Amino acid sequence: MILQICFKIFLIIFLSSSINANESIDNKVKNLTLELRCMTCQNQSVHDSDSDYSRDIKILVKKKFEEGLNEKQIKIFLTERYGEYILFKPYFNSKNLFLWLFPFVLMIISVMVLLKSSKKTKTK
Amino acid sequence: MTSLIGFSALSLSALLSFVILIPNSILKIKVKYFLIICRCSTLLVCASFISLIYAYITSDFSNYNVFQNSHSDKPLIYKITGAWGNHEGSILLWICMISIYGFFYSFLSKALENFKRTVLKIQSGIFIIFALFVIFTSNPFLVNSVYVEEGLGLNPILQDPSLAIHPPMLYLGYVGFSLVFSLAIASLLKDNFDQAWILETRKWSIISWGFLTAGIALGSYWAYYELGWGGWWFWDPVENISLMPWIAGLALVHSLLLVRGEQVIEKWIVFLAILCFSLSILGTFLVRSGILTSVHSFAADASRGLFILLIFFITTGFGFLVFLIKSPTKKNDLQLLLINKTSALIINNILMMIAVLTILLGTIYPIIIEVLTNTRISVGGPYFNSTVLPILLPGFLLMSIAPILSWQTNRIRKFRIYVIFFLILSLLISLQSYLTSFNTWGFIGLLLGTWIILGSLISIILRFKFSPSLNYIKTINSFVAHIGVGIMIIGITYSSIFQKEYIYNMKIGEEVNFENQKLKFNDIKIFEEKNFQSLKAVFSLEKKGRFINYIEPGKNYYPVSKMITTEAGIHHDWLRDIYIVLGSENNNLWFIKVYINPLVSFIWVGVLIMIFSTIIAVLKK
Amino acid sequence: MKKITLLAPLLILTIICLFFLFFILFNKNPNDPPSALLNKDLPKFLSANLYDDSETLAPEDLKGKYTLINFFASWCTPCRAEHHLFFKISEKFPELFILGFSHKDNLNDSKKYLEEEGNPYSFVGIDKDGKIAFEFGVFGLPETFIINNKGKIIFKHTGPLTKKVIDNDITNLF
């Protein structure tokens, strides 16, 4: 009974958080440039960096958003020139499959191993 | 002259350590002399390091290292800290610490003499490998071939208090694990896993982990106020490198606690002990070989990289080889119930291992891909946030109920009280989140953090009778540590998710309002310091008409190195930090970025509590 | 089963170390990422001649020749450091078309720079707004590319060229 109430509260909260308000272009620029590497800096994002390069990229990204492209298209546009190196969040492609699936697979394996060994203890 | 003394002391120290390694069958050394030789080796290497510091203090530019990294105009304190602010000096400090840990072990350990010898032999072995590295590739005692008047090293970024103490703290952590490694290998070779060994290994693991925590925290704190991006963790490769042994060390410390419940997983403990130090060496390799792009810049050199790679391979390989061959065979009778403390600890160990492996993969994946496909990718913050955080979440969940669990049974005493309090807390938090700006991650982080604090707090109150004594503090120590973690989690959640950023272009005299506070741009001041010029913008912060504080972001210009650094102006408050970065000026309008970082103080407070609890844990009853 | 799990750390260690070893041996430079355009076609551009407005250059004009493209500017110090090497390159490879782009630079400053340091380029193009460099994925000066006679980019170097790079990497391309 208590569990049901808790679950319902959780559901309400989770659903209300998924309402996506229409983001302003500046917000879109901020979110994307946080994921872009400043190529002339030592491991900083374009959003955080002050360099000339970052300023140019920020202007470029804003222009592309205004032209109507979405985040994915802009990322493709940039990686065609700078390579995937510019993305802090690696693509989910065949090359990076191992990278993305590794933690997930490990988790599943450990859950299975744990369940197996707890069954063993029960049958003892 | 100092260079000669320093180098001789170093070489002699290495030679003595080499003597230690001679097996008993060839040269029988009595324990008394064995220990004396060991300790002399330590004293010599310390003398070597002191002579390097002396060279820095006296600005002895005949020493090439001092010439490269120091300058007579540097303030004295930074001349000293400059000794370890470069590759050669820092590696010398590293081997000093390897030796010092052995030194203290030789005095403090109550182990049997045979066992002690083995541990010290392995420690000496580690020392020699690194000492050879210093002597042959990273010698801080090279002499300048020409006479020079002045040094080159006046990098302003290095002249900073927390950055000065950050490497020594970090190394005390990394190198501490070398002793834990030696203890583990010795236990494998001598087949000794008794209670005394467990307690001793636990003590040294806690000490190392404590120092590592302090080192990482200092680095984070420095990044926060110095780098001017309002953040304190960037999943930068160098940060990941320090995080891996930290998590592994945490797993080790927890596993060593299993002894309290009379259940020991020897194989796992030994494996973790070897892993921690291996990760430390890996970290050293990745940073100093220059194969990773990161905020940390050490002058990179291919030959050095190869040498450290060799050290890493040999030491780690040796460790895991001994582990393979002489692995303890005792079958452990573990009481694994769903759910008691043992199983919770095991689950957490597994989660921590997965986290470590994920961070490792993410950090070295670009290297693997570039070798295989000749393309370069980046694995940055977004990857780790999407993978490591979800892995750790169930861990934090378990942490909140762990203090309540018992060792032997899966029944929880006073179950109802816990449930009631947890429910009330959850409802309060849900309400609070719903009424303010809601965010899923923010909600989860806050909930977990408060649950952890609540679980530990209730346990302390219900289970232990208060008495103002060290004994009481030691008993509640682990609960207090977890409360520290809970506080830190709340701080991390809030400061990252609910951080606000405001951008203004202001001229002198203007004021802006945000969140019922007023920020007034008073003035621009220019100072001439000893080796730099400083430009500061003076802001005054007011709340409801009352003056709170001056905030002074600025820029420093260092004429010798022609570098400009941005200094953030920060107003610290228990509930939030107001963090201002000064940009460039255009037509008398200054570009200002104001970050509001809520609950940052909780992060530092949480970390301090954790460090404090490691100190308590090591004290004798 | 047990022995395998004990052997795993050693195996993983060896594999990881091999990757590191190869990375170091291949002379990979963290500051010089491999180009995204490697083995791809030359990007489209249209550039006027620095010395003659009416003359323009586009990729079609480079068909059938090996081309070296160098992005430079008068305000770029490392560019000055590598500048003399282009004369040596043009001596060593007389068939090579050396194309220079004045990148984000005042045109008069560029002309003056080439007067002072000499002009090794077969053609000096103008990239004042940086758009051409952007298409090439240039992010910092100087950057040098080599295009083969089929119009594909076969080499890129970020940062100033050195004699070592020329001897080891570039010479092998022809």
Image (cartoon, grey):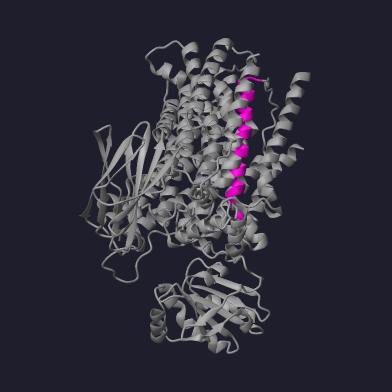
The quadrant in which the N terminus of chain B is found is bottom left
Residue B552 x/y as whole percent: 28, 46
Q: Is residue C69 above or below residue A35?
A: below
Residue B206 x/y as whole percent: 48, 32
Is residue A52 shown to the viewer in this render?
yes
In the image, is residue B371 part of the stretch drawn in magenta? no
The quadrant in which the C terminus of chain B is found is top left
Q: Is residue B612 above or below residue B311?
A: above
Residue shown at 34% from the left, 67% from the top? B144
Q: Is residue C25 left or right of residue B6?
A: right
Nearer the observer, B346 or B147: B346
Residue C24 x/y as whole percent: 58, 62
What is the number of callouts on the image? Answer: 0
Q: Is residue C78 left or right of residue A89?
A: left
Is residue B136 shown to the viewer in this render?
no
Residue A110 x/y as whole percent: 70, 34
Magenta-tinted stretch: B339-367
- Judged by its main secondary structure, the magenta piece is helix
Q: Quadrant of residue B279?
A: top right
Q: Is residue A115 above or below residue B117?
A: above
- Furthest toward the right, the residue is A123
Q: Quadrant of residue B402?
A: top right
Nearer the observer, A63 or C119: A63
Nearer the observer, B390 or B212: B390
In the image, is residue B355 part of the stretch drawn in magenta? yes
